[in-house]
Structures are given as C-alpha cells and as structure tokens.
Image: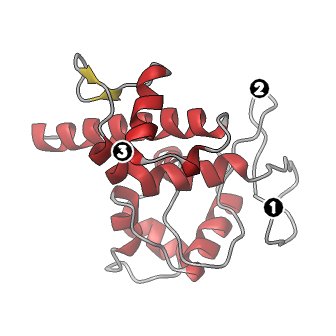
Amino acid sequence: MDARHQGSDANQARRDRNTRAIARHWFETPGFEKLTWDKRAEALSVAGILNEKSKLERKPWSPDALRKLWSRVMNELTALRTPVVANVAGPVASSSTTAISLPTSLGVAPPLFSNDLEARGLTTAERERLQKIMSVHRLSQSAVMDKLGFGRLDASLWSAMRRPWRVRPEMLKALQGLAASCPV
C-alpha cells in the first residue's frame, strides 16, 4: 500500500474517532440541538473533547470544523439511539424500529444495518461492520457487489463508505442480508 493510501486511511480513521467522541458526548447531553455552532464548539472544548488533527496535534473545535462533521455525527447519534436487539438464531423480523445484531463475546451486540427504508448515509458502525465482513471472508469490492446483487461497477456503496453520501434503500436492505449471511 502506498503512502497516499495509508494517509487517506489514517485521516478516515481519525475522522471516525472524532465523530464517535462527539456523538457519545451529545448522546449524554440533552438539549444540544438548541445551541449555536459557537456554543457547541465551546461545550466540546469545556468537556475536553478536542479535534484530533494528527497523532500529535489536538485543537479545540471550531464552529466550521464541527459543521463539516455534523451529518456524520447525527448519523452516529441515530445509531446510538436505535434500540439493539440481540439475536443468535438469525435476522430479526422486519420492523421499522429494530436493528439486526449478532452477539459478541462480551454479551453486548453492536448495531448493524438498521431496517429503515429511506436513503441515508452509512453510520460508522455499519462501515466498520462491512469492512470486518470483507476482511474475515476475504471479499473484494466486486465480490461484495456480486453478493449484494448489484453491478460490479456501481460505486455508490464505496463512495458512501468514504463520504457522507446517501445509500439507496434497496442497497441498505441487501447489506442487511449480507450481514445476516456472513457471520463474523
């Protein structure tokens, strides 16, 4: 892997860590929606949640930096607020409020692909889950698209993995099936 890809992967991992830290903080802080961008940035600084710019550099959040990350934070908050139903035998019966999950060694099941039927961006947990499925089952992007039943040249899923782009409902449903059929 060349240095450019390593840097890109490190930046994405850093962005995801920042997103999760902010989402966890706002999950435990009611009423943050009413705050201005300046007050939100100030509240994060007071709470000790800093913007990780590199391995060595951490800075207080600016309103602009927070605004850029906001759609990802809201997706992560939605995932945190979604009830998780552990299921050992297989997928949960379809309902608009349930999430499919598999048991872990700790007895806590992480949320996988939720059953909502509208286009939306992937959450960090969903991205990580798909990457784990790909690595455990040694699947290429083309193989994943074959399993999902979409054309190999359809780049929408891989664009959504890297950016906060929306994924079609039928692809989300196919991802749900993939998560159920490929245990990790």
Task: Check disc 2 and give the amino acid type.
Answer: Leu
How much space separates mark 3 and mark 1, taking CA atoms? 30 Å
Q: Is residue 38 left or right of residue 91?
A: left
First in sequence: mark 3 vs mark 2:
3
The residue lying at 39 percent from left, 68 percent from top is 165
* Residue bearing mark 3: 66
The residue lying at 44 percent from left, 57 percent from top is 71
Task: Check disc 3 and give the amino acid type.
Answer: Leu
Tag 3's secondary structure? Answer: helix
Q: How is the image coloured?
A: secondary structure
**Residue 129 appears in the figure:** no
Which quadrant of the view contains residue 164? bottom left
Q: Mark 2 or mark 1: which is in front?
A: 1
Quadrant of the rendering where the C terminus is positioned: top right
Task: Check disc 1 and give the amino acid type.
Answer: Thr
Which quadrant of the view contains residue 158? bottom left
How much space separates mark 3 and mark 2, taking CA atoms? 33 Å
Q: How far from the left and from the top, in percent, is residue 98?
A: 81, 61
Q: How far from the left and from the top, in percent, is residue 90?
A: 83, 58
Q: How far from the left and from the top, in percent, is residue 174?
A: 61, 74
Q: Is residue 40 left or right of residue 76?
A: left
First in sequence: mark 3 vs mark 1:
3
